[in-house]
Structure formats: C-alpha cells, structure tokens
C-alpha cells in the first residue's frame, strides 16, 4: 500500500474483525457436519472445538482487511485500495462522482463515527464505501470531494466553450468579468423598466395574490372544471361601453412603484414553515475560513409539517414490515387475532366456529392489520424525515435527515432529470403537497434516482417552488377524450366481476356463505372511473412537458425536453379498437421501484401522434439551445 494512503478509523478494525469472525465461524461448522454425514470417523461432536478456529481465522482476516484498506484524495481522482488476497485499486474521477453520502446509525453517532459512500451515475451500487471514519473526517471528505467535483464541472464547461486550461474561480480577471456582466444586466433591466413605465399599457401591473392563487389552482383543478379561455371576459366591450376599468382608474403603473411585498410569493404564503426567503442574497457566495463555500438554507421541515407528513403518508416499508412479522411468527399472530376477536364474537379457535364467527375474525384481522401498518408507517416516516433540512452549496442541493439513522448527501443540479409534485387524498384535503426530484443513476431514497426536496409544504408554495426550480410556466392541462372514462368504467367493472367470482369460489371450498355480498364493489366502479379520468392530463409547454397521473398517489411530473430519452407510442388491443394510444416518456431516471414512467394515458391516436412529433421537434431544439448555453436546466436557488 502506498504510504500516502489514509486508513479508516481504528474502530473499523474491531468491526471488520467481528464481522468476518462470525461469518467464518460457520465455515468449519458446516464443513464438519457435511463430512460427519459422509464419514463415520468424523463426529459432529467436534463442532465446539472447530468453531473457535473459524472465528479466529475470520478475526485475523478482518484485521488484515483493515490494514490493507486505504483511500486518498488526489487532484483528479479519489483512489481506494482494498483486498487481502485479491487486491483491488479504484480511481474514481471527480467528473463521475454524483453524490457523497454520509450515514450514521445510533451506535455510530454515539461514537462520532460515520459511513461515507461515494456514488457515481453508473448505477445504484456504491462505487466505494468507507466504513468507518470519524465524523470530522467524513465531513471533510464530503466537502473536499464536492469542491473538486464542482471544479471538474467548471473545467468541462470551459472546454465546451473552447477555452484552454483549467478554470480558476478565484482569479481577479473572472471576478471583473462577472461584475461587468452583472452591470450590463442591471443596465438592461433599468432600460426595460423605463420603457415599460412609459408605455401606456397595463403590462407592468404585477399579478396580485388572488391571480397567483388562480394560477396555482391550474396545477390542481379537475380537468372537467378547468378554466375555458372562451369564457373569460373580454376587456374591449367594457371599454366600448364606457365602463371604468382598473387601467383607466389607476393609470399605467411603473414596476418600481409597485410594493415588492404585494407580489412577493414568500410573503404571501409565509407562515413560519422554515423557508429562509428573506435571507441576504449577497451571502450566497460567502466562504468559510477554509475557503469552502458555505451551505445556504433553502427549506427546513418544521415539527408541524413533519407530523402532518407522518400522519398523511403510507410507507411501503411499513407494509413489508407487517408481512415479515406475520410470516415470522404466524402462530403468535393468529393467537393474538383470535384473542382480540373473541370478545366481539370471533371463534375460540381456527378449527371450530360458525361462518359468522369467521367473518368477524376476518374483519377484526383486517382492521388490526390496517392499524398496525399505519402506526408503523407514521413511526417510520417520522424517524426518516426528522430534522429534514435542504440547502445549496454551489450548484448542488444538500440535505440532512433522520432520527435514529442520520443521512447527509447531495443532489447535483446538473443530474436532475425531472421534478415531480406528489400528493394523496389526505394531503389534498388539507392543502399540502410534496416535491421530489429525479436524478440520473443513484438515488438515496429508492436506489432509483428519487429524492425528496420538499417532503411536505403548502400546495401553493410547492407549485411556486416547482415553477422557480424548473422555469416551467403554469400548466393548463389538456382534457382526455370522454371515451377514456368509458374505458375505465368497463375496466373496473371487469375487476369487480373478478372479485365477485373469487368470493363465490371461496364460499364453495369454505364454510363462508353469502358470496353475493361482494357485489357491493360494483358501487365503487363509477366513482373510481371518474376519479382516474379527472386526475389524468398533460401539458405541452415551450420548454417542458408536464404529465399528471394517479389518484391515491397523484404525481405531476415536469420534464425538460432536453432530458427526454425516448417517447414511445403504445396501444393495447382495446386501445386499438377505441382509437386511443398512450405516450410513454422515458428519462434517465423515470422508472423506479415506487414510481412508474411518466405516461400520457388514453389520448386520441391523432393527438397522441401530434404530441409525439412535437416532443421530438422540441427535444432537438432544446438540445441545440443547451449546447449553445451554460444552463443547468434547474435553479439551485429555487425559493
């Protein structure tokens, strides 16, 4: 090992020793049992004597692994060497690094240790893991790698623009250039304001709070009740009739004369929920005593929002946990359910009972499962997003979260593929929503590129953040053809029929009766079809495609055209008969374990082909514009 290599924390030697010790302990035990079954002279009684040898061998290997593991930060790469018998040396270029994740469990937090994972855009597995380093060393590594990664991005952009040599962000010449550019922009803005204030139009009037709320409602309104441009009042007939309008009464209003607080989005919706919207913007480029850029706060999840998010979310991990406990202790679970159901008429045991007793047991079991799953979900969400903080460092979003296990990582802005607003019926009822970003490759939340930027905030505010983050205009969703709703009605009717058929089959092989009561599910078919229909829609903007889908977990995804990988038209047998088609929009991160690919469902074939062609044309235009500019595509200061 090179002498310049850094070693892990000494406690890592203890961890590796115990880990490999208990792992290798089973090698002689299994080998001895196999040989004892094949050869009579070998006895299984030798296991207590053979196991310690395996444990000691594993301890020795763990200690050797610790001493043979090293890491180093060089000018161009992060170098990691590992392996005892088979050596492995990795050089990770800064240009490929996407995230440096710091993870701390309860024990590590008590010992001031941390696990550092270096992730690249190549997939979900960590490229290198440092297990363990001190908390101070983890912070230093994260900050240093992030700084060098940002410098690598700047060099690539400089080479793309045709400049030679590296990019030194601290040079005096570049500072003067930036100052001149800012002055030119300020002068241009002043000229534009002067022209606007002198023009006899009402274009300078900023939208008031009611208009902004109306714009935000366009994100959320049911498609059938959306605003129709044909129904909007025309200003010209009012003027011809001699009626006094706001423009006549107030006259042209210059932009500078309008109070900033009147149309400041943050003042309108600010209720102390953790957004530092009044922070001094000049502090963004401040550096600490080591010359590293400081983190600028963007969002803090307050206690009220954390509780609302916990009580209005259902986590898939909670469902998996309940199923795991059920299969692990089936007998204990059945004993518990029988005990709970007996006071309300359940059977005394599974072998005896009437159909009514079993029906009560089924209902009690379902209710218990729902309650336990919900409680676990609340606890899991609370522990996962406790003390959630989002900030920015240079062009990266940085986050911290977690109660029992603390996470710290970053979301590179240039890796953001799409932005998704999520909500469920409970969150829509209280007027809240969440904001997620999809990145290419690794994602700490789901290993598929999905990470929460704002777990939960007021709906209007989340929509504002989405517009500020992506630059998308307020969408006006296209309504799907009525034929799509009839298709959903037929589909859900078939599903209801299958449920009734299953209930009938169960009554034939069990003591349960009255299978026809299952036909009540047909009552849910019309509202289910309608709710699916009104929550589907899409908007084809100038620079972004917006797709909305889902009712129980509604997702409104904003996709920049230059991030689109492919747009494919898919038609099932039933869609071909009805003249419908679905458009599937793939990005580098659109398919995850918990989120499907953004899809425009059941549009008329002609319209679907038009959208397909328009997306393809705007993709090429967006790629050309992006090649000519230095735009990241998203605003790292989205507040």
Image (cartoon, rainbow, N blue to C red):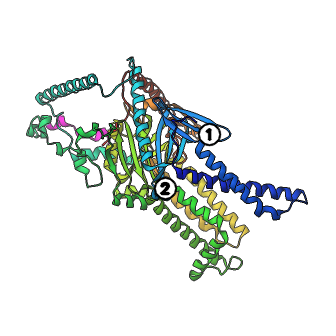
The magenta span reads 226-238
Q: Position of residue 414 (x, y in %)?
A: 42, 33
The quadrant in which the N terminus is found is: top right
Using the image as rendered, state which of residue 501 and residue 22 is in the foreground.
22
Image-quadrant location for residue 569? top right
Work out whether mark 2 precedes mark 1 in sequence or the reverse, and give the earlier one. 2
Count numbered badges in the picture. Answer: 2
| Residue drawn at (46%, 59%) of the image | 110
Question: Dot 1: few (<14), some (14–19), or many (≥20) neighbours within 10 Å?
Answer: few
Q: Where is residue 150 in the image (x, y as percent from the top left)?
A: 40, 32
Q: Position of residue 326 (x, y in %)?
A: 62, 66
Location of residue 217 with respect to 325 vertically, above or below: above
Using the image as rendered, state which of residue 592 and residue 67 is in the foreground.
67
Using the image as rendered, state which of residue 308 and residue 395 is in the foreground.
395
Is residue 359 toward the left or the right of residue 565 in the image? Answer: right
**Contact, CB < 8 Å: mark 2 with mark 1?**
no
Q: Is residue 578 visible?
A: yes
Q: Which mark is residue 619?
A: none
Q: Which residue has dot 1 on it?
A: 573
Q: Residue 108 carries which label?
A: 2
| Inter-mark Cα distance, 2 to 1 | 56 Å
| Residue drawn at (62%, 45%) of the image | 65
Location of residue 114 with respect to 541 vertically, above or below: below
Q: Which of marks 2 and 1 is in front?
A: 2
The quadrant in which the C terminus is found is: top left
Using the image as rendered, state which of residue 228 and residue 219 is in the foreground.
219
Q: Is residue 547 visible?
A: no
Is residue 421 toward the left or the right of residue 517 in the image? Answer: left
Secondary structure under the numbered disc 2 in the rendered image: helix
Asked whether 94 falls inside the magenta stretch, the response is no
Image-quadrant location for residue 231? top left
């Amino acid at each position: 090992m090179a002498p310049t290599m850094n070693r892990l924390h000494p406690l890592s030697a203890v961890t590796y020793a115990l880990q490999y010790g208990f792992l290798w302990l089973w090698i002689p035990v299994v080998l001895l049992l196999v040989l004892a079954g094949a050869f009579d002279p070998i006895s299984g009684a030798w296991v207590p004597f053979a196991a310690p040898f395996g444990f000691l061998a594993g301890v020795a290997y763990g200690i050797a692994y610790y001493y043979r593991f090293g890491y180093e930060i060089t000018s161009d790469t992060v170098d990691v060497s590992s392996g005892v018998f088979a050596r492995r040396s990795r050089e990770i270029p800064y240009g490929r690094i996407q995230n440096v994740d710091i993870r701390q469990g309860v024990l590590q937090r008590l010992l001031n240790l941390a696990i550092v994972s270096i992730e690249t855009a190549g997939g979900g597995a960590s490229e290198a893991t440092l297990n363990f380093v001190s908390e101070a060393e983890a912070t230093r590594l994260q900050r240093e790698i992030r700084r060098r990664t940002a410098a690598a991005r700047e060099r690539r952009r400089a080479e793309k623009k045709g400049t030679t040599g590296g990019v030194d962000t601290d040079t005096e010449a570049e500072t003067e250039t930036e100052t001149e550019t800012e002055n030119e922009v300020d002068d241009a803005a002043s000229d534009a304001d002067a022209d606007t204030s002198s023009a006899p139009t009402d274009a300078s009037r900023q939208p008031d709070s009611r208009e902004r709320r109306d714009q935000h409602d366009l994100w959320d309104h049911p498609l059938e009740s959306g605003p129709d441009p044909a129904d909007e009042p025309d200003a010209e007939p009012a003027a011809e009739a001699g009626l006094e309008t706001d423009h006549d009464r107030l006259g042209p209003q210059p932009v500078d004369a309008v109070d900033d607080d009147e149309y400041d989005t943050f003042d309108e919706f600010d209720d102390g929920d953790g957004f530092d919207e009044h922070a001094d913007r000049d502090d963004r480029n401040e550096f600490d005593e080591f010359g590293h850029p400081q983190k600028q706060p963007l969002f803090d999840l307050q206690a009220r929002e954390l509780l609302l998010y916990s009580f209005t979310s259902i986590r898939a991990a909670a469902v998996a946990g309940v199923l795991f406990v059920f299969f692990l202790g089936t007998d204990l679970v059945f004993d518990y359910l029988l005990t709970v159901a007996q006071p309300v008429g359940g059977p005394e045991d599974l072998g005896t009972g009437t159909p009514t007793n079993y029906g009560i047991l089924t209902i009690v079991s379902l209710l218990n499962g729902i309650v336990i799953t919900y409680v676990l979900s609340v606890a899991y969400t609370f522990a996962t997003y406790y003390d959630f903080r989002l900030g920015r460092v240079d062009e990266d979003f940085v986050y911290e979260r977690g109660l029992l296990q603390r996470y710290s990582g970053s979301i590179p802005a240039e890796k953001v593929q799409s932005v998704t607003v999520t909500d469920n019926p409970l969150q829509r009822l209280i007027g809240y929503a969440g904001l997620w970003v999809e990145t290419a490759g690794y994602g700490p939340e789901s290993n598929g590129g999905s990470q929460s930027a704002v777990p939960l905030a007021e709906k209007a505010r989340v929509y504002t953040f989405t517009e500020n983050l992506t630059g998308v205009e307020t969408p006006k969703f296209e309504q799907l053809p009525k034929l799509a709703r009839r298709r959903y009605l037929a589909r859900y009717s078939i599903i209801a029929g299958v449920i009734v058929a299953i209930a009938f089959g169960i009554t034939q092989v069990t003591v349960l009766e009255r299978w026809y009561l299952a036909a009540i599910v047909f009552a849910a078919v019309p509202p289910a079809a309608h709710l699916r229909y009104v929550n589907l829609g899409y908007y084809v903007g100038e620079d972004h495609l917006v797709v909305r889908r889902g009712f129980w977990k509604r997702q409104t995804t904003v996709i920049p055209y230059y991030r689109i990988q492919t747009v494919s038209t898919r038609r099932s047998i039933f869609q071909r008969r009805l003249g419908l088609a679905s458009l599937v929009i793939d990005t580098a991160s659109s398919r995850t374990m918990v989120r499907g690919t953004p899809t425009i469902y059941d549009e008329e074939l002609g319209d679907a082909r038009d959208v397909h062609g328009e997306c393809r044309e705007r993709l090429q235009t967006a790629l050309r514009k992006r090649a000519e500019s230095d735009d990241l595509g998203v605003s790292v200061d989205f507040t």
